[in-house]
Amino acid sequence: MKQDTLFSSDSTPQSQTADPVTCLGKTFTNDQERREYFLALLAEKLKDSEFRKIEGFPIGNDDDILNLSDPPYYTACPNPWIGDFIAEWEAQKPACDEEYHREPFAADVSEGKNDPIYNAHSYHTKVPHKAIMRYILHYTNPGDIVFDGFCGTGMTGVAAQMCGDKEAVASLGYQVKIDGTILQQEIDENGEIIWKAFSKLGPRKAALNDLSPAATFIAYNYNAPVEIQSFEQEVQLLLQEVEKQFEWMYVTKHTDGQIGKVNYTVWSEVYSCPGCSNEIIYYKEAFSERSDGIATYSDIFKCSHCNILVAKKPSKNSGASALTRVLITEHDASSSVIKKQKRVPVKINYSIGTTRYEKFVDTDDLKKIEESEKFILKSILPIFRMPEGDECRRNDDEGITHVHHFYTNRTLAIITQIIKRCNSKHIDFIIGSMLPKLTIMNRYMPQHGSRALVGPMANTLYVPPVSVENNPLEQFKFQFKKVIQALNNKSGSVITNQGIQSAKIKPESIDYIFIDPPFGANIMYSELNYIRESWFRVFTNNKPEAIENKTQKKDGDTYRSLMCESFKLAYTSLKPGR
């Protein structure tokens, strides 16, 4: 039986366009017809065994790759049409007799990250699009073709488009004349401030590539056009349906009987005391709450049952004994009987009106949590074993061996019910943007007072002893408000998913290259993306991944070799003198 996936629908915001569209020289009745035509071509291409041998070809079956793709603009595999787009864009350029020349860009670039586009979807590394705009404006002309071989979330594509937005260009401190000439402030030989022309207003075209399906899907959503009004209506209808049926899972009783909306639930690991064998709920023993709402934390404390000094990982000179994990046995969605770290809900943060309250979990709360499990749609669950890696199996001792173990059952129920009703790639974008906020990797640190929700530990898959279960319904609303500000109705990018070393870019066809490459052993991209990619069942092929990684047997020399091949492709793609 075919499994449902996060991307099981053929409908996209583009398909709502009823007007005729022209794509790569071919005219279609509407955008849905365009998509179906190119999907059929891509489906045929996927049957070619040689095509699948392209370096960096993602791991996934044909159906899942097709569900994720929107050809010819974006394919969750090597894009067969990237060369056609580049040739078409080059032919559309206005004639220019001016010989190309640019002085090296020598200014300091520092752009804040408090921007709706930047913040719509998190990723391990991301350069603000406004910072990239400065380079593109300096080195290119309107209509020029920009290539980013490590595109990540596609900010280079966004920047290329925004070079045609007068307001966005002016926000960088430049002046824009009526004829589109862009001026920047300089100091002349007399020390006087002058405004000097250096660029022209107008969008540039972008060819984007990344090895990760998670990254390229984010890039696609940032760079694909969407009809905002109909998309907004679609989201509201979905949310109303899900809330009507399932908001009971996230309500709780106040002291006077009023019903409050749960913002988040705090979960704690449970350990066993080495002295008396009694269970210790870590949160209750390690944290001491004060009346001002700020808690004190101690990693060494006394067992409340026998009074001996204990700690999770005591140092040699601490005098403390090591706590033992309490493991529970249960039937798992993977059809196996597993042992996993015992976790219990201990505390709820909830709202009545605009006022927030906190309470300890009561029997009614526990009953709701237990009842929610029956609404998990197992056909949608990403029941995938975490792969071998420097990060991926760090939680095996806790029984967190598969992707679905990174979520509470109640969270899985809501996510799968939303996905069941999902019929738009941009709604999938919202779901993807909230997934990192819904795992048990989100830390609860009340010693920070009002900033107790500190999120996951950056660039790791660390699971803390005290975690936060955010309300998925509220997270969906929150992320929707962020995403709607980042979407646009313009397009000018083509996206391919493969190793940069094998990208089919015609030599001397690119006007400018912007690259923010991976840096050695800093971030294990394919491992960190595995959880997110499991939801749409298309995974990074890490063979050409340019990192240092012990599990992949990639040392510094391997990293340098892979980066050298990447830069060779970049160099041969550039036009002479660029």
Image: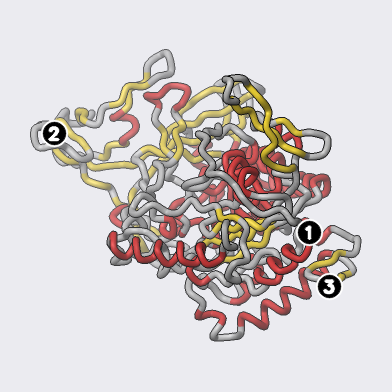
Frontmost residue, 371 versus 443: 443
Left or right of residue 318: residue 407: right
Q: Position of residue 153 (x, y in %)?
A: 57, 51
Q: Quadrant of residue 15?
A: bottom right
Q: CA distance from mark 1 to mark 2?
A: 77 Å
N-terminal-most mark, 3 or 1: 3
Alpha carbon distance from label 3 to label 1: 24 Å
How far apart are labels 2 and 3 at the CA level? 73 Å
Residue identifier under label 2: 320
Q: Quadrant of the C terminus?
A: bottom right
Report the quarter where the N terminus lies.
bottom right
| Circle 3: residue type | Lys
Residue identifier under label 3? 26
Identify the amino acid type marked 2.
Ala
The vertical placement of 306 against 67, above or below, is above
Residue neighbourhood size for the residue with mark 1, other residues' Cα within 10 Å, grouped as few (<14), some (14–19), many (≥20): few
Residue, disc 1: 95
Residue at the far top: name it: 291
* Secondary-structure class at tag 3: strand
Give the answer, above or below, for where 47 lies relative to 5.
below
Q: Residue at x 50, y 63 (%)?
A: 571
Task: Give the class, few, some or many, for how many residues have Cα within 10 Å of label 3's Cα (few <14, many ≥20).
Answer: few
Q: Earlier in the sequence, mark 2 or mark 3?
A: 3
Number of numbered callouts drawn: 3
Near-viewer residue (262 or 121): 121
Residue 455, position as x, y percentages in the image: 45, 38
